[in-house]
């Protein structure tokens, strides 16, 4: 009994040394750690499918291979269809594109917007209107944009490299998942076996429930975005194309909470402007055709529609659905998202709620262990 205090001291010292060492090497291993976290999250989503296939195919390897190949096929089919549609849209726009018409359209849009402004704001803009937009300026802007896009090449290669590593990690974890779990449980001392097993199972359940909730929320955003864009086409004649792809992109981006619907807003606005350059009525369009607020090229209609989608998702779907799935109050979910965003940006928002749910499970099990220490 006399060795209890020194043992605790040395154990605490080792923990502090470990934390300090981890802090020193974190910048070198952070990418790998994040890849492993995302591989585990992806494994949690795919695990029920793999287990179901394994029970029927009698082979873990074939089940993993079938699941991963199917997932890759779906992603490739979606991306190829999207690229084909975008290419066709670009060819159509390029065929109808006339530089002078674009310059004139910009002038018309500027004049129309200035005319609708209050007098004091109008005077400020008109004082600077002696410098008309030239075609060569437009060409310069286009060249600048193209140069910026060319710089994305290196980032794209890096992204695909990380995606391949993520896929490799996911395949390994899927194949060895139950072996990893048994190995982890085997390290738990007999005295704490019950609480350790409960902890592992509850963390697994929390993460799985959260991811299912996020997927349901993403599907909700995709459907609402597609329906909203379709209604704009039907009700106000917005002439929007690729609405299914825009909706799916908004839904997938919703996995980064709070900003998902906005991911579809920018391409929707660009498509609306390009498709309606030759439509004089689109320039003088008013919000939803009856609200006396100018909305040239249906820009405000699109923004308002995505704002409505965001409000429905953020206030009714994500906090309640995701919060319920991890057993946390919606306010705690929002606070966790804000903390994750401030610490690690969008990546932090992706993993904030699973981390918060894991912490909640650990604290709950520790509390249970303290209260029932006589049973251990």
Image (cartoon, rainbow, N blue to C red):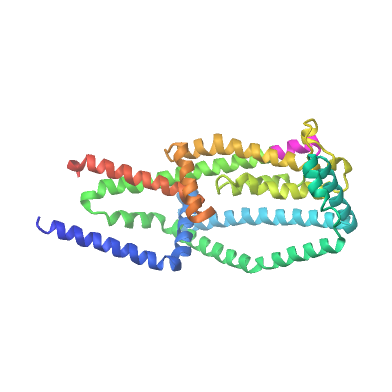
| Residue at x 44% of width, y 36% of height | 329
The reply, left or right, for residue 7 in relation to residue 323 is left
Disc tally is 0
Which segment is the magenta one? 228-239
Locate the C terminus by quadrant: top left
Question: Which quadrant holds residue 7?
Answer: bottom left
Q: Look at the image and tell me whether residue 285 can be seen.
A: yes
Q: Position of residue 231 (x, y in %)?
A: 74, 35
**Nearest the eye: 74 or 116:** 116
Locate the N terminus by quadrant: bottom left
**Nearest the eye: 201 or 138:** 138
Q: Position of residue 322 (x, y in %)?
A: 49, 40
- Above or below, 131 relative to 233: below
| Residue at x 80% of width, y 65% of height | 140
> Magenta stretch containing residue 373, yes or no?
no
The reply, left or right, for residue 214 in relation to residue 98 is left
Q: Position of residue 76 (x, y in %)?
A: 64, 57
- Above or below, 56 relative to 216: below
- Extreme top residue here? 290
| Residue at x 87% of width, y 61% of height | 135
Q: Position of residue 79 (x, y in %)?
A: 67, 55
- Name the chief secondary structure element in magenta: helix
Q: Look at the image and tell me whether residue 239 can be seen.
A: no
């Amino acid at each position: 009994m006399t060795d209890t205090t020194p043992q605790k001291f040395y154990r605490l010292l080792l923990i502090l040394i470990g934390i300090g060492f981890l802090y020193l090497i974190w910048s070198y291993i952070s990418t790998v750690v994040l890849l492993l976290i995302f591989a585990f999250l992806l494994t949690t989503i795919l695990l029920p499918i793999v287990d179901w296939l394994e029970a029927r195919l009698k082979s873990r390897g074939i089940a993993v291979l079938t699941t991963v190949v199917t997932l890759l096929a779906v992603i490739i089919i979606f991306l190829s269809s999207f690229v084909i549609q975008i290419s066709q849209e670009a060819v159509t726009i390029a065929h109808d594109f006339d530089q002078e018409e674009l310059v004139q359209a910009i002038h018309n849009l500027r004049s129309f917007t200035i005319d609708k402004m209050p007098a004091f704001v109008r005077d400020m803009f008109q004082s600077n209107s002696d410098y008309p937009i030239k075609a060569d300026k437009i060409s310069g802007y286009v060249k600048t944009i193209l140069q910026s896009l060319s710089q994305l090449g290196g980032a794209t290669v890096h992204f695909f490299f990380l995606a391949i590593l993520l896929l490799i990690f996911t395949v390994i974890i899927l194949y060895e998942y139950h072996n990893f779990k048994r190995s982890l449980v085997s390290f738990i001392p007999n005295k704490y076996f019950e609480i350790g097993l409960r902890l592992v199972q509850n963390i697994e359940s929390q993460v799985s429930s959260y991811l299912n909730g996020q997927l349901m929320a993403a599907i909700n955003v995709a459907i609402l975005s597609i329906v909203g864009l379709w209604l704009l086409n039907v009700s106000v004649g917005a002439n929007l194309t690729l609405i299914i792809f825009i909706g799916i992109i908004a839904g997938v981006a919703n996995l980064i909470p709070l900003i998902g619907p906005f991911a579809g807003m920018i391409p929707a606005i660009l498509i609306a402007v390009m498709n309606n350059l030759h439509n004089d009525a689109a320039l003088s369009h008013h919000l939803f055709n009856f609200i006396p607020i100018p909305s040239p090229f249906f820009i405000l209609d699109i923004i308002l529609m995505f704002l409505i989608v965001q409000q429905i998702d953020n206030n009714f779907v994500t906090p309640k659905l995701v919060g319920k799935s991890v057993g946390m109050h919606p306010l705690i979910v929002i606070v966790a998202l804000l903390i994750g965003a401030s610490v690690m940006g969008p990546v932090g928002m992706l993993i904030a709620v699973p981390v918060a749910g894991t912490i909640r499970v650990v604290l709950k099990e520790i509390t249970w262990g303290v209260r029932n220490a006589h049973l251990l």
